[in-house]
Amino acid sequence: MKTLRIVFMGSPDFAIPSLEALHKSEHDIVAVASNPDKRRGRGGEPQPTVVKKKAMDLGYPTIDVEDPKSDEFAEKLIRLKPDLLVVVAFRILPKKILSIPAIGSINLHASLLPRYRGAAPIHWAIIKGEKETGCSVFFLDEKVDTGEIIAQFKTDVGPLETTGDLYNRLKVKGAELLKDTVDRIAEGTSEGMVQNHEQATPAPKLFKENTKIDFNQSVEDVHNLIRGLNPFPTAWCMFGEQKLNIYKAKPGPKTSNAKPGQLVEIDNRLYVQCNDGLLELLELQLPGTKRLSGVDFLNGYDTSVQLK
């Protein structure tokens, strides 16, 4: 098997297992590119991304990428003469960067492409109630998440599984898939498969507007939104004039005379009415307070207030 010269690119902790897997491989990581150091608190010194810190711990040279479109970044990569760019949870790269490596540029994406192209594939797979998801390794091209697929693995999504649960699972399994794919590329046994673009679905960034709970939806849809946004950025609604974050819930009884958004107490448990039944609220938080169980919220707040 040929030893490949690799430039690894990533910033968040999702990329750490992939970097570690390639570190243990037969391949040569010639540099690790990551986002610039950033101040993470008032008055503190700028801190490296977790990927850059891990790269330094492993003894690799690092590149701070201010602008992936810059000539300076391109020139640094050209001097490294990489065979392959390996990208995990990084930024969109322009054609002039993708064309530098001798073999090409590959990306690990946390969905079964062409499903859930975009910035938040794990969140949206759970929000949409998928029973199955996985990871894909594909060749990068100029458009987001559209290149030829080289390898995929599938995994079931549990009915109570959160984005945090799935994130931690996929970053490990994805690293194994990525390392195996790089080996196959080095052996010359990898083949790309063109994506069926008609089956593509989006996984856009998450903002305040698309994380608000609508209690006129079904119990299943509201529950999926809550677990899909746990632990970040969190599903929310309004409790009077205050924003209420809801971290954890589970489906409850189907029968109730309440209106959507109305809080209901049954056997010292806190429920909220949705379109087709009750959802039990298990973990909530108001601004400036600690997280509360549904029981503690029930005992401490006016539950005649309707959630909106």
Image: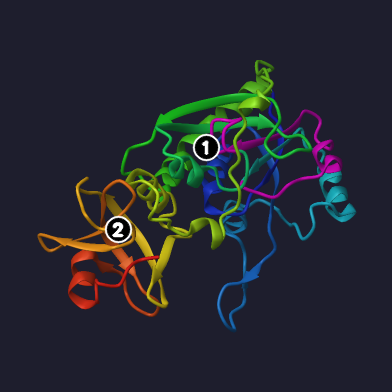
**The stretch drawn in magenta includes residue 18:** no
- State whether residue 308 is above or below residue 253: below
Relative to the observer, which residue lies in front, 88 or 274? 274
Image location (x, y in percent) of residue 94 = 81, 44
* Residue position for label 2: 259
Amino acid type assigned to the residue bearing label 2 in the image = Lys
Say if residue 1 shows up in the picture: no
Where 26 falls versus 292 (above or below)? above
SS label for mark 1: helix
Query: Where does the magenta region start and end?
Result: 89-116
Residue at (65% x, 30% y) in the render:
138
Circle nearer the viewer, 2 or 1: 2
**Which residue lies most toward the left here?**
267
Q: Is residue 96 magenta?
A: yes
Give the residue number, with chain letter if any, for mark 1: 175
Q: Quadrant of residue 86?
A: top right
In the image, residue 289 lies at what x, y percent? 34, 78
Give neighbour class at mark 1: few <14, some 14-19, many 20+ (Cα, 10 Å). many
Q: Nearer the viewer, residue 86 or 223?
A: 223
Q: Using the image as rendered, state which of residue 190 and residue 121 is in the foreground.
A: 121
Most prominent secondary structure in the magenta stretch?
loop
Where disc 2 sits, the SS reads loop
* Quadrant (top left/top right/bottom left/bottom right) for the C terminus: bottom left
Taking the image as shown, residue 95 lies to the left or right of residue 308, namely right
Residue in the image at 69% along x and 21% along y: 194
- Amino acid bearing label 1: Ala
Q: Residue at x 55, y 77 (%)?
A: 41
